Amino acid sequence: MDLKIIDNFLPENEFEMLVNNTIGRNDGKQVQFRVVSNVENFGAAQEYWSWYMIHMVYLNDAPQSEIYPNLYQIFVSKFKQIAKFKSLIRIKLNAFPHTDKVREHKKHFDYSYEHIGAVFSLNTCDGYTKFSDETKVESIANRIVFFDASKHHQSTTTSNSKLRYNINFNFL
């Protein structure tokens, strides 16, 4: 699958509701994240900045979070219009840290078999996703990029926001 970038993926009211129900709540009820101490997680030497936080929404054919029904309802019908959607593999929220300058994590692929990945940006910042052909897709709120997630790509930190937030989807 070639890269497919769509700006303003969700209607503005739907996007605002999504942000408010995930990362934007001020009432202490936003989703809880857990720290993953090494983004690459391949046992390689870890850079001090190479960590991130995740909130697993869907994995191993089962919902893992109370926000799963809402995300499924919002995104899957749209995915069916864009790609040949058969089934979900994983949904997770990512939060990458602020660093003094934007730092690229090591290249990785999500799963070794061919499948579609999608990265949906929840906020605008100077972070990006970089693909094997060196294309960089900037983190712009309400932007989504579809790609072959069995091919190498890499994430980054941000230097102009507290955190870089996105939702990572993998599906067949």
Image (cartoon, rainbow, N blue to C red):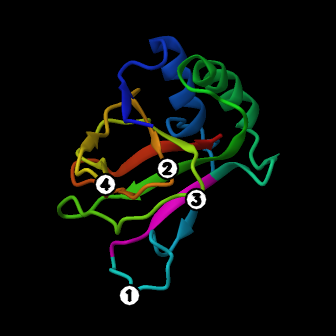
Work out how far the residue at label 1 is from the one at label 3, CA to CA, in angstroms. Answer: 22 Å
32 to 37, vertically: above or below: above
* Residue type pointed to by label 2: Ala
Comes first in the chain, label 2 or label 1: 1
Instruction: Tell me the amino acid under the disc marked 1.
Output: Ala
Location of mark 3 (residue) = 111
Contact, mark 2 vs mark 1 (Cβ under 8 Å): no
Q: Magenta segment: does it hold 53?
A: yes
Q: Is residue 11 left or right of residue 5?
A: right
The Cα–Cα distance between marks 4 and 2, rounded to whole angstroms, is: 11 Å
Label pair 3/2, CB-CB below 8 angstroms: yes
Task: Choose mark 4 or mark 1, whichever is in front.
Answer: 4
Residue on which the image places disc 4 = 132
Q: Earlier in the sequence, mark 4 or mark 2?
A: 4
Mark 2 crowd level (few <14, some 14–19, many ≥20, 10 Å Cα): many
Q: Earlier in the sequence, mark 1 or mark 3?
A: 1
Is tag 4's residue or tag 1's residue first in the polypeptide sequence?
Answer: 1
Q: Which mark is residue 149?
A: 2
Q: What is the three-letter code of the residue carrying label 4? A: Ser
